[in-house]
Image (cartoon, helix red, strand yellow):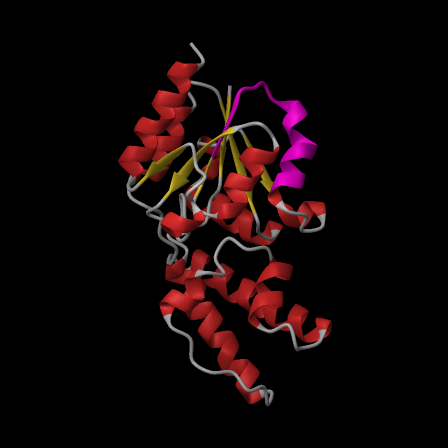
Amino acid sequence: MTFVFDYDGTIHDSMRIYAPAFRKCCEIMRLDGENVREYSNREIEKWIGMDVNAMWSDFRPDISENKKKKYSGFIGEYMEELIYSGRAVLYDGALEAVRQTGVYGKTVFLSSCKRSYMEAHKKAFDLGKYFDSFYCTEDYGFKPKYAVFENIKGRYDGPFVIIGDRYSDLETAFKNGARSIGCLYGYGGEKELEMADIKVRTVGEMRQAILSEAKRDI
């Protein structure tokens, strides 16, 4: 059995570093002459968990690809600075839940992020102690998560359970015949996660849902 975990919004409380990095990027864009308004936390939250291309297509589809690359790079670099300076925060009990999951099967990290971001978190939180393997969509040309999972799932034994807080996680499960646990404590919300097999509101409930899924395989 294999459990595939999203990271941002599922294990990592991403707004702690994403919001300040996004707002700093907006400041730089204004200095460059771009017309960028102020954004609320609720507006910013919707971009957590999106891959880079989808985020910029939604946020500012009007600017050039070179500018998207420049500003995206800045957001990533500043978030990594915040990670290494100790500003990143995980949800209480999240890594312990992953550790306990390892009793029932393999634990896989799958995130719509850049490799440097993933490596920064691995180092900051010693994630290698908790996950058996790591995948980021940058290594696959920022293909959608479901396509990346299609590529890697042959390396693992099923059945599969996908755990995450965004539609992309549920889509990954649906398109690959896996079960899904939707984490409402993250950034997706009820409507986005309505197709989840199980919906949870806390990390504790997520841990119990994983146990329930493991028992299905006994």
Question: Compared to 59, does 53 lie above or below?
Answer: above
Instruction: Give the image location of residue 88, x and y in percent.
Output: 39, 55
Q: Looking at this view, name the residue that lies furthest to the top.
A: 218
Which residue does the image show at 61% across and 31% down from the upper left?
176
Q: Out of 127 and 23, give the one closest to the viewer.
A: 23
Question: Compared to 13, does 42 lie above or below?
Answer: below
Instruction: Give the image location of residue 89, x and y in percent.
Output: 35, 52
Check residue 49 for magenta coloring: no
Which residue does the image show at 50% across and 59% down from the upper left?
80
Quadrant housing residue 197: top left
Quadrant housing residue 14: bottom left
Check residue 154 for magenta coloring: yes
Instruction: Give the image location of residue 86, x and y in percent.
Output: 38, 56
Instruction: Give the image location of residue 102, x and y in percent.
Output: 43, 23
Q: Is residue 102 left or right of residue 177?
A: left
Q: Out of 178 and 16, give the one closest to the viewer.
A: 178
Q: Is residue 82 left or right of residue 202?
A: right
Which residue does the image show at 40% across and 22% down from the upper left?
213
Span shown in magenta: 146-162
Question: Compared to 39, does 114 lie above or below?
Answer: above
Q: Is residue 39 left or right of residue 60?
A: left
Which residue does the image show at 44% across and 66% down from the upper left?
44
